[in-house]
Image (spheres, rainbow, N blue to C red):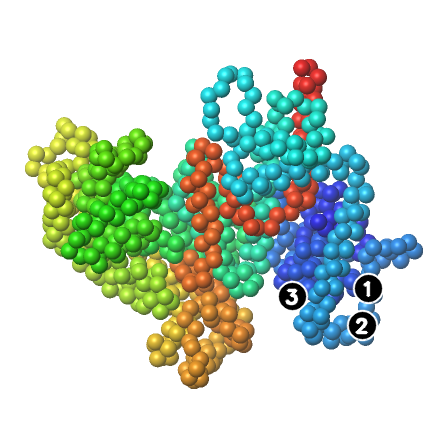
Amino acid sequence: MPNFCAAPNCTRKSTQSDLAFFRFPRDPGRCQKWVENCRRSDLEDKTPDQLNKHYRLCAKHFEDSMICRNSPYRTVLRENAVPTIFDLTSHLGNTGRRRKRIKELTEEEIRALKERKLDTAASEQENHKANSDADVQVVEIEEAEERAALTPEERENKDYLKSLFEILILMGKQNVPLESPDSEVLKGTFVPDNFQALLEYRINSGDDVLRRRFETTAVNLEYCSYKQQKQMLEICESCIREEVLREVRDAQFFSIIADDTVQLAGDEYLPVFVRFIDETNYLREEFLGFLPSEVEAEVLAVNFHTTITEKWGLNMEYCRGQAYVSSSAVSPKMKYVASQLLKRYPRAVYTLCSSCALNIWLAKSTPVAGVSVALGTLEDLHKFFKKSPVLQEELDFTITLQFLHSDERGTELKKVIRSEWVSRHDTFEIMVGLLESFVLCLDKVACDTSFKCNATVTSHAFVLSSALSDFDFIVTVVILKNALSFTRAFGKNLQGQTSDLFSAANSLTAVLHALNEVLENIEVYHEFWFEEATNLAAKLDVPVKLPGRFRRMQHANLQPDLTPETFYKEALSIPTIQHIIQGLKDIFSEQHLKALKCLSLIPSVMGQQKFSTSEDHNTDIYKCDLPNPDTLSAELHCWRVKWKHRGKDVELPSDIYESLHLPDIKFFPNVYALLKALCVLPVFKLENESYVIRRSRLKAYLEGTPAEQRSSHLALVHVNNDARHDLDLMVDTYIKLYAEKSESDVLNDKSELDVA
């Protein structure tokens, strides 16, 4: 790891200084300025990636105004920071050997340097291997010098801490919780946790550093306290997150996405992701961590903004989108968060998240208790059949019997239920169509003695069958199916091809008009919906009645003439339609619709529109992001002409991803900037979705770890297990923050041993 400052005549090292050290930027323009100001000739031929990886400058070489000190874990530079403070003369009186050579530039050398940099691509390719070898040698020399400057005790302590960090990272990657599974033990009996067990395994496997550290320690004592583990995990999390955030800052534009709340050790947290286009123009969605959600909306909005800007160091001026997937309990809070961010950052457009179907998003946020219960039942039902092939086969057999006269439909449904059907735009239609099959199958599992299952599965099946056979559940899913049928095609387009997304932006008015007509004639529509629910209930021998919770709460004041039909109209149908209308208006603001209509820049969409679209007025929201806004109109005209008069063998790029990777896209700088800003919006779903890996890993972590054993720190390490991590940096950070505390802990442990 590069621990020496790369500035001439500077001998500071990150291991022996409290100063922050900053990597050279990857941006070629900024990196060039850093190298020129350093005046080191040996750095001129190195690429920005090589400089970023192997060289750093300490904070002494930057003006105070260029540095942001946000937290004890990290200090960051401003976006345009350039080092300007250097000592270029003190070496003149020193005739000894210098590791860093200062280049004195003449006018001829400056001219030659500019000429040489015009041909950097060819020279980089020829000397790539030589430069890489030289970089490795420099790093090895610096590491050797650093280790030589340390005392034997300091070296051994660093090696010891590095071993501990390696164990913690391994636990995070392999999803091993810190605590062992609960077991009944006698009071006072020592039971090692998973961390202790792995530590002992490494000692027994020949880790001499750990063995020497603990050879005099009793095996029934903690080798590393829980407090120290937590401190080290916080540093692991911070360092790995910083690697991700560094790329986000280099990308400039980004969007923030918060998923539905999850349980961590008894508390509710929001998983937060960041979406951006990396330097190779690949779309990525990275996991940044968790935020507590069990606070008031005003407090959550402040915490959300403070964490993103001050703790994580992102500049919200470059945020181009925000999306939140939340249940009805948290949805009003997240709506408030979105409104507060929009007040401060108008270009952070509030959009739908492409990972969540529109109808599911609308249902999750519906402020009706019965809807939340129904969604929870659907999730439970999906997990029940998913966990066992035997149960899945039994459900397939039941569906086959139900659809004997419609084999094609039955085959289609059997295929659907093996997928993530609870996340589809037609989830409630599937549920209504298969409700009878689900109940019959669950009843067989719960009551048929010929179907052999353990007691847990049998009791679970009985509970699910009872939940599905409740009229409140039946009428809820039927009304949701019908109410959301008006947004089904619209939502499907939002998750479809780019051309479908563009057409969706132009069809919103028609969708809202249809929903308003339903609301005006809700008595007629509700009558048909309720009749469908009662017919379905009759097939399952379920009595039509008011929900039990309502009857119990209104026992004394229950109106004798209140019918189930009237009750569900007022308590479910009307609030659901009103919520859908308002939800669409909130999520599809004027700014959001303009962004969607900017998809007319995509060549395939232009072709469908006969190259007659005019994008100028829709691109207003991105004028500040363009390199040459004054030439936008002329450039868009050239862009249309290019594709209108293309050769017959040239296919039109069909999405943003293809357009960004066109070989000549850089000749259209404004179009290129517009596409990059558009692409990070959470609503856009591209075909090459490598970014879903992070969501899959988080889901696997949550499903595979009991709620009480989940750790926000280990979760981030697990989800980002392929992210680069610098063990030396983690060790140095720990020493700076907790060196004195860790030494006192060791002394306390030794004193306890002496007493024993």
Give whichever of discs 3 and 2 has the lower sequence position: 3
Height in image: 556 above or below 693?
above
Circle 2 residue: 109
Left or right of residue 204: residue 360: left
Residue occupying the far left of the picture: 561
Q: Answer whether labels 1 and 2 touch (C-beta < 8 Å).
A: yes
Height in image: 367 above or below 495?
above
Q: Within 10 angstroms of label 3, few (less than 14), some, or many (20 or more) residues?
A: few
| Closer to the camera in the image, 228 or 442 | 442
**Residue 173 drawn at (x, y percent):** 54, 43
Separation of residues labelled 1 and 2 (CA atoms) = 10 Å
Height in image: 560 above or below 96?
above
Picture disc at residue 642: none
Q: Within 10 angstroms of label 1, few (less than 14), some, or many (20 or more) residues?
A: some
Q: Residue at x 25, y 45 (%)?
A: 395
Q: Exactly how many numbered labels are in the figure?
A: 3
Circle 1 residue: 103
Left or right of residue 690: residue 126: right
Q: Amino acid at mark 2?
A: Glu
Q: Amino acid at mark 1?
A: Lys
Residue occupying the far top of the picture: 755
Give whichever of discs 1 and 3 has the lower sequence position: 3
Circle 3 residue: 29
**Residue 252 drawn at (x, y percent):** 54, 60
Query: What element does badge 1 sit on?
Result: loop
Q: Residue at x 29, y 54 (%)?
A: 415
**Residue 449 drawn at (x, y percent):** 23, 33
Give whichever of discs 1 and 2 has the lower sequence position: 1
Q: Amino acid at mark 3?
A: Gly
Q: Within 10 angstroms of label 2, few (less than 14), some, or many (20 or more) residues?
A: few
